[in-house]
Amino acid sequence: MLDTLSAPLIKAVLWIAPFLVTSVYITDITRITMGHMPFRRARLSPPRLGAGKASEPSAGADDPLFMQLTNGFSRLCMLTACLLAWMCLPVLRGAEAPYLVTYGHRLEEPGNLEIATHQVAGSPKGGNSFLNTLMEIEYGVKSWWTTELYLSGQGTRHEGAVFTGYRIENRFRPLLREHWINPVLYIEWVDVNGADKSLREVVGHDTFEDQLEPNSETRHERKREVEGKLILSSNFKGWNVSENFIAEKIVNHAEPWEFGYAIGVSRPLAMKAKPYRCNFCAENFHAGVEVYGGLGTRHEFGLRGTSHYLAPIIAWTLPNNTTLEFSPGFGLNQNSHGVLWRFTVAREFNQFGRWLRGMR
């Protein structure tokens, strides 16, 4: 009995451990960089003869910032070890487009589970820098239906960290066969507070000024939204082109419908796969670019007073279906953030539903 349960238990621990260590590491680094981790007073060296004042504390073992960053580095080493162990688990490879804002037409395979963390960092003009983290759990219910749960939190320099809420997302693909244009219908329920800075999309007249209000005020605001997207996606000779039209409505306030868009183009660096297992081969890397922004509201539709971004993307997918993605989003007008830095770590577990049923 113990032998039967030991292998699944070990796999479960290896699957979950990297995310736990990642959350602890991100929390520590956020608290240090945002200035919220309590510091011990630095020990000053005694004044030398002829010196008028004590010398400055050295950046050595007695410096509290140095010591805390060293602890953070130790956690990073632990995270790296967990990720290496995690990457050794054999899982098949997926083929989803590497976008961080735009959606393509690929859905999760039935029974497959994907767990991911999405980070976005920014430094709005005249405000405090922030880091927002989204924890994503995605599951393939049917070949035409994928559902996702997001948990969101953020930390802002000098303002502290706050859990901001959750999102429930569903995507439906009415045409299962591959077509020249593949439509997908998207609907999402959002329950967050006003401190949310996930910036999963840009709609209406969203600008960088929305992130200037302090957490002490915005955390008490409640936003319940319904969001829909029409996703159109095409594959042609290795290229993927995806277009999203976004409509969003805050339902607990008298706000008009807001609209936005996202367009992405991507391609693997090589189309022909090697006949052997390879981590750094060109076919494991995708490159692309996204353009996204707001389109105003039902009463003021258009580009006036909106913000827009241009974001190159690089993605690296390992043979076991661990994916790392990085994208700097450059603001295109005065209403935009200067740069939004996005980073994602995702892992897919094939036939998780079947494995879970087998544990009964």
Image (cartoon, rainbow, N blue to C red):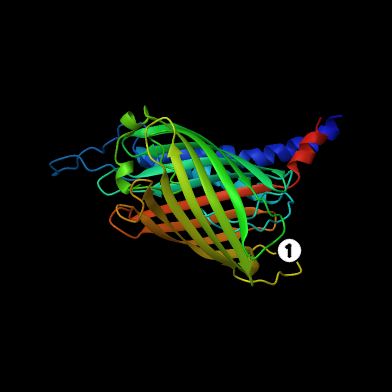
Which residue of the protein is positioned furthest toward the front in this rendering?
Answer: 299
- Give the camera-side residue of 284 and 27: 284
3 sits left or right of 14 in the view: right
Q: Residue at x 69, y 48 (%)?
A: 144
What residue did someone put label 1 on?
277
- Give the camera-side residue of 279 and 151: 151
125 sits left or right of 201 in the view: left
Q: Residue at x 57, y 46 (%)?
A: 186
Q: Quadrant of residue 281?
A: bottom right
Measuring from the top left, give residue 106's x and y in whole percent. 64, 55
Look at the image and tell me whether residue 61 can be seen: no
Q: Looking at the image, is 168 positioned above or below residue 172?
A: above
Measuring from the top left, give residue 267's x and y in whole percent. 58, 67
Which residue of the protein is positioned furthest toward the right in this rendering?
Answer: 1
Look at the image and tell me whether residue 330 can be seen: yes
**Which quadrant of the figure contains the C terminus?**
top right
100 sits left or right of 174 in the view: left
Query: Callout 1: few (<14), some (14-19), or many (20+) C-alpha neighbours within 10 Å?
Result: few
